[in-house]
Every structure is written in C-alpha cells, then in structure tokens.
Amino acid sequence: MPYTNEEGGLVNNFASEPKVYQAEPPNRGQQRTYIILGITAAVFVGGLIFVAFAVSNAG
C-alpha cells in the first residue's frame, strides 16, 4: 500500500488505484435483456400505482 511520511512523523495511506479500462457497448443479447427488464419494471411500477389507487379509493 502506498504511503507518505509527512512532517512530524505522520503517515498518510492512499488507496490503490483501480485499473482503468474503456467500457464496451452492449451486444444485441444484452440490449434485448435491458429492454425486457425495462418493460417488466414499468409494468410492475404501473401495477403498484394501480393497487395503491384502488386501495385508497376502496373505503
């Protein structure tokens, strides 16, 4: 672990830096998975809103 000694004997520890890499764009299969997950999440949130609305007006 890299560290430096400052005046007065203090030690500063620094976190090791992660390796940097360039991200790759998603392939067709990953894009399809993201679309399916997005649609599923939208339907789920819509269902929750519908249930909340139905319950609040049930009384």
Image (spheres, rainbow, N blue to C red):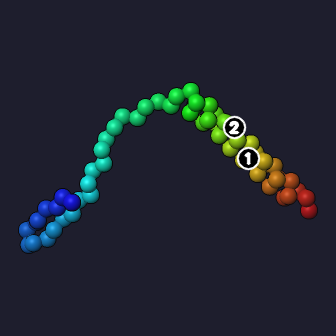
Q: Is residue 40 above or below residue 5?
A: above
Q: Nearer the viewer, residue 40 or 49?
A: 40
Which quadrant of the view contains residue 13? bottom left
Name the secondary structure under disc 1: helix
Q: Residues within 10 Å of mark 1 (few under 14, many from 20)?
A: few
Name the secondary structure under disc 2: helix
Point 56% across, 27% down: residue: 28
Gap between marks 1 and 2 measured at Cα: 9 Å
The number of numbered discs placed on residues in the rendered structure image is: 2
Where residue 58 appears, x then y in whole percent? 91, 58
Where residue 44 appears, x then y in whole percent? 73, 47
Q: Given the image, on which type of amino acid does mark 2 rest?
A: Ile
Point 91% across, 62% down: residue: 59
In the figure, is residue 57 to the left or right of 31?
A: right
Where residue 25 appears, x then y in whole percent? 47, 30
Q: Is residue 27 above or below residue 3?
A: above
User: Which residue is most to the left?
Assistant: 7
Which numbered marker is on residue 33? none
Which numbered marker is on residue 39? 2
Point 31% across, 41% down: residue: 20
Q: Which residue is mark 1?
A: 44
Which quadrant of the view contains residue 56? bottom right
